[in-house]
Image (cartoon, helix red, strand yellow):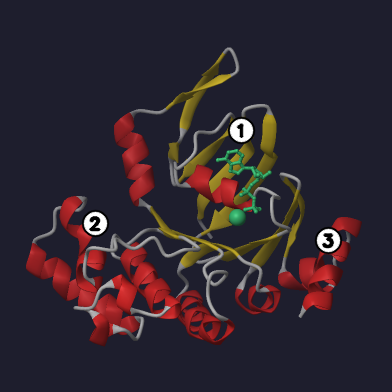
Amino acid sequence: MKEIVKVENLVKKYKDMVAVKDVSFSVKEGEVLAIIGSSGSGKSTVLRCMNQLEKIDGGNIRIDEDEMVKGYKKEKPIYNDKEILKKMNLKCGMVFQNFNLFPHKSILENVTEAMITVLKMDKKQAEEKAIKLLDKMGIQDKKDAYPCNLSGGQQQRVSIARALAIEPEILFMDEPTSALDPELIGEVLKVIKKLAEEKKTMVIVTHEIQFASQVADRVIFMDKGSIIEIGTPKEVIENPKEERTKQFLQRYLERV
Ligand code: ADP
Ligand code: MG
């Protein structure tokens, strides 16, 4: 299967603090990759680098045939041309923990926004597509409402519809259910599961270990900015090799 994303020796620092050290992995077309690990281990930073929300300090990120950095000069990355970076970014959809919907736009406008401004689609066409996506997320009846009138679970489903609107090749989700009340988690996991069944390529940072086990093709366990283990859920979650993975899973089991 084709490799859509390749992360090579990624390094990200915040001042002197190294948040991500020498992280390498790839994502194949149609694959679901889950990233698990304690808070502060660098999971969000990895996603934010792939989405160009943070500048990288070392290594490279490739999406299809394009590379984020075209070379290094005195150990400083030289970013690729704007056009290429934009093309790469259009292939990436992002879903955030706190939904990040535009509060003053209706649900329909939230979903059509990028189609109209970025893809230059006409309004009617964009609305038709948005309604289809909202329908798929089971939330079409809320199209004229505003984010503040929706539950967290509904808002997150809108945010998934919005991310899908630009037809990204890969969808990144950063703890999509962490901000939700327990009774609303299921409805969001359900739509993510549906996307996984449709073979949407996804990288999901999650604390829902059981969910990761069910839906992911491969799992990455991160600790202190590094990948400790990567493999199938059976390998990493059921039969972890590394002591740090075992401890993390043990702590998780004690909590649930
Ligand atoms: P995770 O998502 O696994 O909880 P993060 O990627 O958010 O971890 O953070 C990794 C490390 O980088 C943490 O030590 C965190 O405090 C630090 N960090 C994250 N974002 C920033 C930032 N904008 N400025 C400074 N430090 C940050
Ligand atoms: Mg995080």
Callout 2–callout 3 Cβ contact below 8 Å: no
Q: Secondary structure at mark 1?
A: strand
Q: Quadrant of residue 240?
A: bottom right
Q: Is residue 60 positioned above or below 46 on the image? A: above
Residue that numbered label 3 is attached to: 245
Q: Is residue 41 positioned above or below 84 on the image? A: below
Q: Position of residue 175 (x, y in %)?
A: 56, 64
Disc marking residue 114 = 2
Disc marking residue 14 = 1
Q: Label 3 amino acid?
A: Thr
User: Residue at 69% of width from left, 75% of height from top?
Assistant: 213
Q: Position of residue 39 (x, y in %)?
A: 69, 56
Q: Quadrant of residue 38?
A: bottom right
Closer to the camera, 91 or 114? 114
Q: Position of residue 35 (x, y in %)?
A: 65, 60
Q: Earlier in the sequence, mark 2 or mark 1?
A: 1
